[in-house]
Image (cartoon, helix red, strand yellow):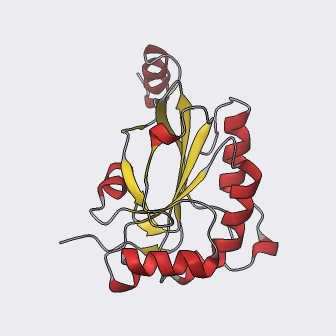
């Protein structure tokens, strides 16, 4: 039996689709107000976009405006959560709160200093996005990777991966490109 046929047989036995990674609920501190945020905070949303970010990576700075636009456009259906798992001094909770005030952030900026959510999702870079679909309170990753294909020049973006994935999620269709390699700075892991 050739590999292609074997793959088709395996898919048919699995119900025709590959299962998405389920995400366990989490509770992280929002440095904007000191209150915890979890997936249970968003029971009626179609999904949640989790974006790993930092205070110190140049790539994160390139995307700040684009993330704000996405958040404004989809806030009631697919809220954006910024997560900082960095362990460097420039990414401390105090530094996060200062950065959030400086940027006048309107989206939750969550501290993941024990790197629990980072490990659960397999995040390794900033910015790196994980789009979660909500199916009756069960959240699963349906897209992960880059926000788009041009970090430095927004006007030259040809593929807005996250925006496209959100639009497809909202039509309840299958995302054809569920993963794109992220560009950015590596997240330093705790020893």
Q: Could you tell me which quadrant the N terminus lies in?
A: top left
**Residue 176, image x, y percentages:** 64, 40
The outermost residue toward the right is 155
Residue at 42% x, 38% y: name it: 21
Looking at the image, residue 21 sits to the left or right of residue 177; the answer is left
- In the displayed image of the protein, which residue is found farthest to the left? 191
Left/right of residue 115 with respect to residue 133 in the rendered view: left
Q: Does 4 appear above or below 37?
A: above
Residue 154 can be seen, yes or no: yes
Compared to 24, does 31 lie above or below?
below
Q: Residue at x 66, y 64 (%)?
A: 67
Residue drawn at (54%, 70%) of the image: 183
Relative to 174, is 143 above or below? below
Q: From the image, which quarter does the C terminus lie in?
A: bottom left
Q: Nearer the viewer, residue 52 or 8?
A: 52
Q: In which quarter of the image is residue 178?
A: top right
Image label count: 0
In this image, 105 relative to 186: left or right? right
Q: Could you tell me residue 153's position as x and y percent?
A: 74, 78
Percent of width and height locating residue 74? 72, 48
Q: Along the horizontal axis of the image, is 66 left or right of 53?
A: right
Q: Position of residue 49 (x, y in %)?
A: 57, 50
């Amino acid at each position: 039996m050739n590999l292609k046929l074997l793959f088709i047989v395996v898919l048919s036995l699995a119900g025709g689709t590959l299962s998405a990674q389920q995400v366990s609920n989490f509770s992280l501190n929002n440095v904007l107000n000191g209150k915890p945020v979890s997936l249970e905070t968003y029971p009626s949303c179609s999904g949640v976009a989790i974006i790993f970010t930092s205070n110190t990576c140049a790539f994160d700075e390139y995307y700040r405006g684009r993330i704000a636009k996405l958040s404004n456009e989809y806030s009631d259906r697919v809220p954006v959560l910024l997560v900082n798992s960095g362990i460097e001094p420039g990414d401390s909770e105090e530094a996060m709160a200062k950065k959030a005030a400086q940027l006048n952030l309107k989206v939750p900026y969550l501290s993941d200093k024990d790197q629990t959510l980072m490990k659960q999702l397999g995040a390794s870079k900033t910015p790196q996005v994980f789009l979660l679909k909500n199916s009756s309170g069960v959240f699963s990753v349906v897209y992960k990777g880059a926000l788009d294909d041009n970090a430095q020049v927004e006007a030259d973006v040809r593929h807005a991966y996250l925006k496209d994935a959100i639009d497809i999620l909202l039509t309840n269709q299958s995302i054809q490109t569920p993963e794109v390699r992220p560009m950015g700075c590596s997240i330093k892991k705790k020893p």
